[in-house]
Amino acid sequence: MNNLIGIIILVGAVCSIVTVLTMYPAVRVVLLRALRQPSFMILTIILLTAALGLNVAVSAMKLHFKKEAVPLARPLGAIPEKLGSWVQVSQDQPLDKEMQDVLGTKEYIFRDYVNETDVPGAADRFRDQPVEKRRELLNGIRTQFPNAVISMSVTYYTGMVDTVAHVPDRCVTADGYEPKEYLTVRWPIARDLPTAFKPVDSGNQPVDDVELRYINFEDQTGSSKYPRSVSYFFHTNGKFISSPLGVRNELANLFVKKGYYAKIETMTTISDTKVSADKTANFLSFALPEVHKCMPDWQKVIAADKPAEVAAK
């Protein structure tokens, strides 16, 4: 297939050259002069050989420059409304088309959770309330009990380029916040995952700790009295990765046909950064197993591709 594409490109290039020579006599004169130069002919032959050789190499080595899409195991909306003592108080709402285009995916959830340990009966306050009323109630709880509120977003990307565009490092800063503390941390939030899906240490042994980015932001505009503490990490081709560069490196493997990544992000407005970290880790320990159930089983994805590759040989 790659050889056929190379031949088509070559034929197209020849046709384009013939067209130019026909329409522009001056170009024809210059080109004929160049063709009389041995160095020009040698360089042309080298470039053509390299172009054809590249296609042959890509085909022979089974390289994949464009990743095929991998569907979610189940919709992100299947993540429960109750995660431990945390209850969802917002409603899942679709973004408008413009915002969705900026986000770059149709697979996402944006949710607010309240800890009923801190605010007993929180779910009852929000039941059957419209969106605006829910927002009003949430702002009241956030003001009175900031330790009880956490926001979570999960966005899923597949079948696309490997660029990770939307990370808090850029997006929150664009809102007028500056990072006061920027950490890479390990939290034991994978303890309830099945052993086969846990992260592994340097000895390839399963561990409970997941590496995350944890950033504390301060408002520089004076328009908000709330700080922001943000955590995020990725699930990419079956692995937990903390950095956008790590995601790109994973997806840059040309020997792998398919690829995906999901970004799991949380935000609190808790002023005490240690309390914020503890609350976030507690929330994620309940949320991660449910988020993970939505992710593709990467080993099955890889195994499903192998028979086709064997048959192709």
Image: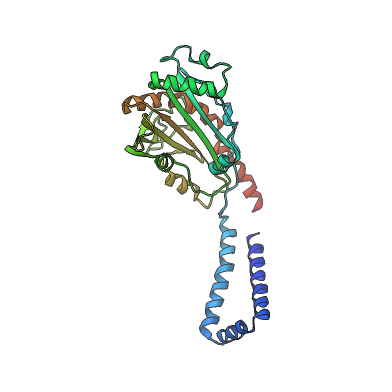
- Of 161 and 235, the residue lying toward us: 161
Q: Is residue 231 above or below residue 32?
A: above
Instruction: Identify which residue is drawn at 63% across, 65% down.
Output: 6
For residue 27, side relative to residue 218 (left or right):
right
Q: Residue at x 53, y 85 (%)?
A: 38
**Where residue 113 appears, x then y in whole percent?**
48, 23
Image coordinates for residue 87, horizontal then vertical, percent: 49, 19
Please tell me whether residue 42 is drawn above or below residue 275 in the rendered image.
Answer: below
Quadrant location of residue 29? bottom right
Image point 44% across, 20% down: which residue? 140
Number of numbered discs overlaid on the protein picture = 0
Left or right: residue 23 versus residue 205 is: right
Quadrant (top left/top right/bottom left/bottom right) for the C terminus: bottom right
Q: As rendered, which of 221 and 312 lies closer to the eye?
A: 221
> To which quarter of the image does residue 186 belong?
top left
Q: Quadrant of residue 93?
A: top right
Q: Position of residue 134 (x, y in %)?
A: 52, 21
Where the N terminus falls, by quadrant?
bottom right
Residue nearest the viewer, comparing 17 with 286: 17
Please say which color scheme the image uses. Answer: rainbow
Horizontally, residue 179 falls left or right of residue 35, namely left
